[in-house]
Amino acid sequence: MTPAGDRADRLEGMSAESAEHRVRLLTWFALATGALGAVLVAVPSLLPVGGPWAQLALGVVTLVLAFRARRIGIAEIEGYDGRLSLLAAILGFIVVFFAGQVAFGLLVALAN
């Protein structure tokens, strides 16, 4: 069996209760990382060295966690309402957008 097949078997064998628990944890971790990234975007002086790179990393982690929660929720939970994970994903996109602008500006300034 391939690793992807093993992963699919694990998801199929997961009970609805453990799927709900995983989705809840992933969603709240995504919201927490997104909120932290948003705070760092709003107040960049909190992390003066490496700020944009940490913000980008938090944005990407937020996106990964939010979309993983959505994938598990849609596949395993009947009647799944993914509004919180969608909010986390939107927050992740916002953090990546604004942090990416600053990081790109730093790279352009470094190249010139």
Image (spheres, grey):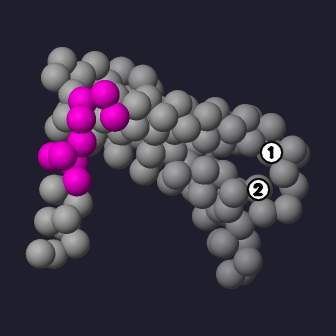
Q: Give residue 101's position: percent from left, percent from top.
A: 60, 54
Q: Which residue is mark 1?
A: 44
The answer to whether the residue labelled 2 contacts the one labelled 1, judged by CB atoms less than 8 Å apart, is yes
Report the amino acid beneath label 2: Gly
Q: Which residue is mark 2?
A: 51
- Residue 72 position by quadrant: top left
**Magenta region: which residues?**
10-18
Q: What kind of element bears circle 2?
A: helix
> Viewed as shown, does residue 54 lie left or right of 66?
right
> Viewed as shown, does residue 82 lie left or right of 103?
left
Report the amino acid beneath label 1: Pro
Residue at horizontal 16%, vertical 23%?
Answer: 78
Instruction: Please report whichever mark, 2 or 1, sits nearer to the chain's N-terminal start.
Output: 1
Q: Give residue 35's position: percent from left, percent from top.
A: 64, 33
Residue toward you, 100 or 6: 6
Residue 60 vertical placement versus 4 (above, below) = above
Q: Is residue 53 visible?
A: yes
Residue toward you, 42 or 64: 64
- Residue 22 position by quadrant: top left
Residue at horizontal 60%, vertical 50%?
Answer: 58
Q: Is residue 92 visible?
A: no
Residue 102 vertical placement versus 22 (above, below) = below
Q: Magenta span has 109?
A: no
Q: Is the residue marked by circle 1 packed among few (<14), some (14-19), or many (20+) residues within 10 Å?
A: some
